[in-house]
Structure formats: structure tokens, C-alpha cells
Image: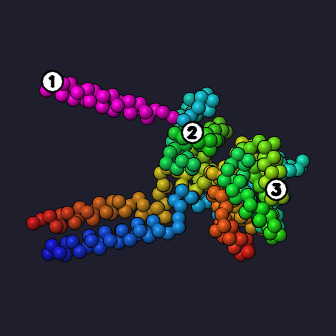
Amino acid sequence: MKTKKLIFRKIIVITFFIFISTLFLKNVIAVEPDEILKNEKQEMRARIISKNIRCMVCQNQSIDDSNAPLARDLRLLIRDQIKDGKKDYEIYNFLTDRYGDFILLKPPLKLSTLALWFLPFLFFIIGIFVVFKYSKK
Amino acid sequence: MKKHILFFPSIFFILILLIFFYLLTIDRDPSKVPSALLNKNFPKFETESLLKEKKFVASKEFKDRIILVNFFASWCNPCRIEHDFIKRFSNNKKIKVIGINYKDNPKKANEWLKKLGNPYSNIALDKNGRIAIDWGVYGIPETFVVNSDGIIKYRHVGPINKKIYKKINKIINEN
């Protein structure tokens, strides 16, 4: 009986540590030391932009997380453009002109993506309607 | 009353199943992204040439004829697989085949071409991959068809196979 309790306690402690360590996993990035800009503000901007840009090679990762050579090239390119004084939207436009909207991890709100953005709400409303209408009795 | 409730959801469910089944069976690869450059002017660039002493100036090379642009490298295995098809394209007098050597060692590229044969009328060197980025390239080999007005008509990602070879020939004949 006692050993059972001990094992149970061990499992709880281990899962707790696994959980805690996943919190730190978020900080794992692919940016290499030689890429980092000296100007902290510019580096912050570069990091935020790279988090929104899809790695076209791996497709479900941002270029900020990816070790693919193309992701590194794009990270360097973004930093070059920031150093050249380009604004954020100009950098996004530069990338979408070449790779299309797919390179943005978040699809932009456009006429062609209206359904994508608003259908979930529509289904939610229909769902509520159905539940209320048929659950009265 | 209860039957009435079940009728619509089941129809809806079957409809969704049919849509999924359709998407599964049609010939489609979701990892292949359509090019943002289709029906636009080709991105201009100037760089060194692998074959000639003279500089490679895209606006001079891309003129009057249909151009087949092929991104390749000696380190890229799929490029070797499609090489025979590129050679076949070079026999077509209607088009000019231009290679863009992506992040490669020129020496190795030359050896590679000696061994397998050179189908390219000129080869541009893209040492740091910036030209490829301008073309929206994300995985070589990639092949583009540029018409005689300098408009990109087609892009294929990955090695050319029989089916794609036929498709590109059709596009060449249409332009």
C-alpha cells in the first residue's frame, strides 16, 4: 500500500517537471549568434517579423524556429532590410510579392479569405440556434 | 419530430464526407504552392556566368524567345533525376534553356555538367541564393516557363517527370 503511494507521488513529481520544462522549450529558437543585430530595437523587430513568416521548406514552422538554410537566408534578408531603414509593411510586401500570401503564417483578411475568417462564427451562431431551438423540451 | 431532426445533420455529414473523399482522390499535392509570380514579369538580375566570361544580364538573355529557367545545383540529387528531361528541352528549337546554379561550387557544377552533359545555353551563378528568393524559389529543382514578352507562364517545384514534361511542352506550344 505504501509503495503504491510512493510511486504515485513520483509520477506526479515527474509530470510536474516535464510540464515546467515545456515552458522553457518555447525559448528554443533557430537564430544563430552571427545573425543578431547590434541594435536591440531593430533585432526585436526582426524577431517579431520572422515569427510571422512561414518557412516555405518546412511549412508548419516560422523562419524564427526553423534551421532550414532558406529560413536563415530570409532571416538575414529581413535584418538587412531593417538596417536599410525599410518599414515593417514594406518587408512583408517584399516577401508576399515573391512567395504569395502563403508565406504569412496568419492568412490576411481579404475578399478571398472572408469565408475562412467568418465561417467559424457563422457555424457557432447556427449551433447555438439549433441547441436552443431543439432543447426546449 | 425526432426523424426530422436527424435528417439534416446526416445529409450534412454525408456531404462533408463526399468533399473530403473528393479532395483525397484528386491529383494534388498540398505542399506545392502556386507561384505568386505567375503572369507577372520575370525578376531581373545581373550576375556572373558559369559558362562565359561576360556577365549574365537577364534582360539581355531573356529576349524574343520562350525561356525555360531551371534552378539546379550539383549537390541536388533530384536535379540529376530530371536532367534527361532538361536535355530533351534543349533540343527544342523554339525555346532557350537557361540554368541558374543555386548555392553551388562553380568547379563542382562544371564537373557535374561535363559528366551529365550541358543542356543550358547560359548559366547564371546564384552564390548566396538571393536570385532564387526574388523568384520565390523554396526548393530546387524548380523550373519556370517565361514567354517571349518576359511574362512567367508556369512554375514547377521538384524534378520534372514525364507528365510535367508533357505539360510544359503544351505550354510552350501555346505561347
Q: Main secondary structure of the magenta part?
A: helix
Specify the amino acid type for callout 1.
Answer: Lys
Q: Amino acid at mark 2?
A: Asn
Viewer-proximal residue among B99 and B46: B99
Viewer-nearest of labels 1 and 2? 1
Residue type (three-letter) at the residue carrying disc 3: Asn
Residue B130 shows in this picture: no
At horizontal 81% and vertical 67% (from top left) the residue drawn is B91
The disc label shown at residue A2, or none: 1
Location of residue B21 with respect to B143 vertically, above or below: below
- In the picture provided, is B146 more to the left or to the right than A11? right
Q: Which residue is mark 2?
A: A67
Q: Is residue B118 magenta?
A: no
Residue B6 % position (x, y): 21, 72
Chain to which the residue tagged by mark 2 belongs: A
Per the model, the C-alpha gap separating discs 2 and 3 is 33 Å
Residue drawn at point x = 75 percent, y = 49 percent: B101
Please tell me whether residue A10 belongs to the stretch shown in magenta: yes
Q: Is residue B75 left or right of residue A59?
A: right
Question: What residue would you read off at disc 3?
Answer: B118
State the SS at label 1: helix
Instruction: Name the secondary structure under disc 3.
Output: loop
Chain where mark 3 sits: B
Magenta stretch?
Answer: A1-29
Q: Real-space Cα distance between discs 1 and 3?
A: 77 Å
Marks 1 and 2, how far apart at CA? 49 Å
Residue under the image location 31 percent in, 69 percent down: B13
User: On what subunit does the disc labeled 1 rest?
Assistant: A
Is the C terminus of chain B in the top left, top right, bottom left or bottom right quadrant? bottom right
**How many neighbours does mark 3 have within 10 angstroms: few (below 14), some (14-19), or many (20 or more)?**
some
